[in-house]
Amino acid sequence: MAVIHIWLYLSRYNRPVLNWIRSLTSSAARKTLKGVDVSSFQGPPADWAKAAGSIVWAAVKLTELEPDGTRYVNPDAAADWDWLKKNKKGRIAYFFGHPSVSAAETVNFFLAELNKLGLHDTDAVALDLEVSDGTTAAHVATWSADVQSELHSRIGRKPLVYTFIDFAAAGNCAHLGSYPLWIADPSRPAGDPQVPAPWKTWAIHQYDITGEIDRDVANYASQKAMFTALGKTPAPAKPPPPPPPKEPKVINVGGNVSAVASARWPDGEMVVAGLGADGYIQSARWDNKAWSEWGNISPTKAKGTPSVIAWVDGAGVLFYIEESGKVVELTTTDRGRTWV
């Protein structure tokens, strides 16, 4: 995943300068999490684990969908992925992006291989974005934004963007500022990279590409913090279910009536009246403390539903229909205690 840089010149022809910068690197790296990125160039873990040293995490290249249609899969990816799991290291799966190839096919190919290896909630993913394939910066920016959006929606985590300073400065990353930045900047000490626009901060710094393995540091306090941030975003907590409706309080008013009507006076006292089983209008009243016994209040038998109206000062009127069909009016001045 190395980018061509003047750093290569320093590493080959100016070892004192290189050693001095690495001394600065070691000092800065103590405040970050050490990691490496590997591909088939490093071979299986037996070939690179010793060189990696004491790392907290590693990134593994999985796929590269090339412009000529070649579907490259890192032959050592499965071994790398399994080794990291067994050794309780943080895992990042990455793929090399070609903006001249379909964004959808690129993502589909990568996820198909990643699903074979197994994707855990604490795993992270990354797009390695460092070539334009001869397309414009505007195209690269749009293509990479499409790739990242598709990945984010399908695996529920924000994918990292690996790139380098000059490539980002050319506008190829214009729409990627909301995704965590993995910046290749071997010109700066570990943990102190340049941060190109559109980013304001960095997540991972690749600071050394000169040895047998690329070295990085991550800008997190712990492995848990790193992969909580880069792993699967937890689903929002579901609100607790609403409490079951309270059973309505049932007050048995008694009586043996049908076709009930009622009225209420301003002070809260009430009267309820209905057609009794014996054919007479019966009523009961509420005095704000208890219900009275039911009693007949009509002088004649009735049919149908009575009508009750309450007025101020305890006055009220009740209408009912006699068996003959005549309408009878009864009145009260004492909130339904007596009717005449």
Image: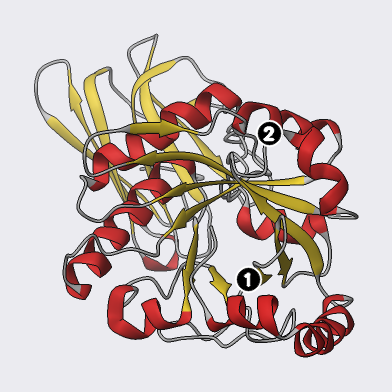
Residue at point 50%, 64% (across, down)? 162
Residue at point 76%, 52% (across, down)? 57
Q: Which residue is mark 1?
A: 203
Whether 110 is drawn above or below 309: the answer is above
Task: Please tell me whether mark 1 sits on a helix, a strand or a loop.
Answer: loop
Residue most toward the left?
325
Percent position (x, y) of residue 128? 45, 57
Percent position (x, y) of residue 330? 29, 42
Tell me: 32 left or right of 6. Answer: right
Name the residue type under label 2: Trp
Name the residue type under label 1: Ala
Q: CA distance from mark 1 to mark 2?
A: 21 Å
Percent position (x, y) of residue 35? 76, 58
Residue at point 42%, 86% (across, down)? 197
Q: Quadrant location of residue 286?
A: top right
Q: Nearer the viewer, residue 213 or 315?
A: 213
Tell me: 108 left or right of 82. Answer: left
- Local crowd at mark 2 within 10 Å, few (<14), some, or many (≥20)? many
Q: Nearer the viewer, residue 141 or 304?
A: 141
Q: Quadrant location of residue 135?
A: bottom left
Task: Please tell me whether mark 2 sits on a helix, a strand or a loop.
Answer: helix
Residue at point 26%, 64% (across, down)? 132
